[in-house]
Image (tube, coloured by chain):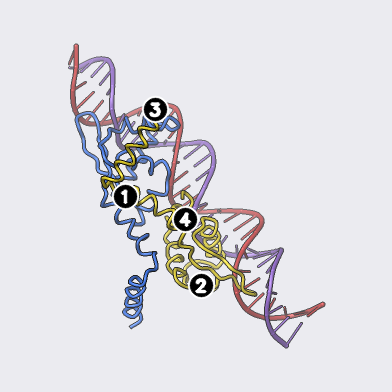
Chain colours: A blue, B yellow, C purple, D red
Amino acid sequence: MDEALRAVADPTRRTILVLVRDRELPAGDIAARFPGISRPAVSQHLRILVTAGLLDMRRDGNRRLYRMRPDGLAEAAVFFESMWSDPLRRLKDAAEREEGSS
Amino acid sequence: MDEALRAVADPTRRTILVLVRDRELPAGDIAARFPGISRPAVSQHLRILVTAGLLDMRRDGNRRLYRMRPDGLAEAAVFFESMWSDPLRRLKDAAEREEGSS
DNA sequence: CTCCTGTGTAAGATGTTGCTTAAATACTTA
DNA sequence: TAAGTATTTAAGCAACATCTTACACAGGAG
């Protein structure tokens, strides 16, 4: 989860995620969306996203196709879910505190 | 949103957020939970969290009391929400693409 | 095999982060 | 006012992140 949150903290990487959210794209097409930065830079972002479990990669001949991996993001989203202080959540946390202190 | 996500990417800061999720705590009490790092280091984390809009601070005599500000996290959570590719979401995005390309 | 296209890797410059220690500030108490 | 407590600010440093350019590798086409 730590890795996924760090990956998502970068705006370039968030844009990449949106790009491949519901379709596969080759690395070149992705890089073309970022005129400001070089191809290798985008390639590095892609590696970080794959390592963090946020992207799936598949080779297709010459090219490498990337697509979002929703499960990866879900793990990171768990943190946010856990922060809403609804009553149910408080009960669960209280129970965990009991366990921890015994 | 960018700032909030960057703030949350750090594990120490996430722990701080959990600590003050549903109660106020003085800076000293917070720092005491991190035996590994110095008080100034924790103070810096607190500043970052306040700047990112994730924490509220209030002075009480000598001390400074911190508490989570749920709205701040909600803004960051918007990104995660927007990534689940449900049909409604796709419709909305398609509409936005139409607008953008016209 | 050779050339071209698509892509990743290596090495290095530069900026940012997270920590430390030392000093400063703000408030409380005697 | 002087001393003590709670906390932040300042300065400096080591580690890390992000970018660049140059190079290497893999696969398809001639």
- Numbered disc in front, either 1 or 4: 4
Q: A102 or A18: which is nearer to us?
A: A18
Indicate the quadrant where residue A40 lies.
top left
- The residue at the point 52 percent across, 61 percent down is B45
Q: Which residue is denoted by mark 1 in the rendering?
A: A52
Coordinates of residue A73 in the picture (x, y in percent) = 31, 52
Chain of the residue that carries numbered disc 4 in the rendered image: B
| Mark nearer the N terminus (3 vs 4) | 4
Q: Residues within 10 Å of mark 2 (few under 14, many from 20)?
A: some
- The residue at the point 50 percent across, 73 percent down is B32
Using the numbered discs, state the Cα–Cα distance from disc 3 to disc 2 in whole angstroms.
Answer: 50 Å
Q: Which residue is denoted by mark 2 in the rendering?
A: B24
Q: Is residue D3 left or right of residue B87?
A: right
- Numbered disc in front, either 3 or 2: 3
* Secondary structure of the residue carrying numbered label 1: loop
Discs 1 and 2 lie in a common subunit: no
Amino acid type, label 2: Glu
Q: Which residue is denoted by mark 3 in the rendering?
A: B102
Q: Which residue is denoted by mark 4 in the rendering?
A: B7
* Residue B43: numbered disc: none
Chain of the residue that carries numbered disc 3 in the rendered image: B
Amino acid type, label 1: Ala
Using the numbered discs, state the Cα–Cα distance from disc 3 to disc 1 in whole angstroms.
Answer: 36 Å
Q: Are marks 1 and 4 in contact (CB under 8 Å)?
A: no
- Numbered disc in front, either 2 or 4: 2
